Amino acid sequence: MRWVAFIPMLWKKLKSEGPPDLLVIQIGENDLVSQKSLDLALSIKAGIELIHDCYPRIHIMWSDLLERRCWLGARNPKRVNVARQKVSKAVGRAVVG
């Protein structure tokens, strides 16, 4: 799943099942090859902020993006891994804040 599909799917789940006490978010690896790391980090942070604003009682945990042995479609896997680390750190700091 890509990040852009996550929020609509989440709203649908929240509407039908109600909000959970804890939401663990671990998504975004599939976006790293096709999107700039800054844009992805900003999009994820905005989405998490939106979730928090709409459902302030949900505790949100961010799980760092997972490293892969092979990044499909990547010309330079090392650069994708560096982007993965940057996005994970940026979003992690935002969630803690």
Image (cartoon, rainbow, N blue to C red):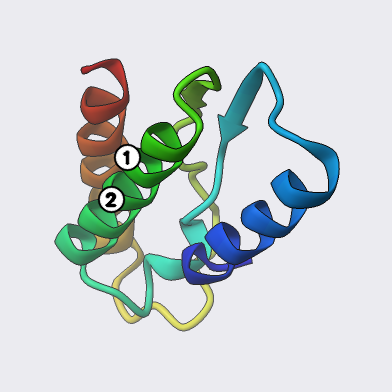
**On the rendered structure, is 79 left or right of 81?**
left
Q: Amino acid at mark 2?
A: Ala
The residue closer to the viewer here, 24 or 70, is 24
Distance between the alpha carbons at the discs numbered 2 and 1? 5 Å
Q: Which residue is mark 2?
A: 46
**On the rendered structure, is 58 left or right of 50?**
right
Q: Amino acid at mark 1?
A: Glu
Where 48 falls versus 3 (above or below)? above
Q: Are marks 2 and 1 in contact (CB under 8 Å)?
A: yes
Disc 1 element: helix
Which label belongs to residue 49? 1
The residue closer to the viewer here, 80 or 29, is 29
Taking the spot 45% from the left edge, 24% from the top edge, the residue there is 56
Near mark 2 (Cα within 10 A), the count class, few <14, some 14-19 or many ≥20, is some
Taking the spot 47% from the left edge, 56% from the top edge, the residue there is 28
Residue 89 location (% of width, % of height): 24, 32
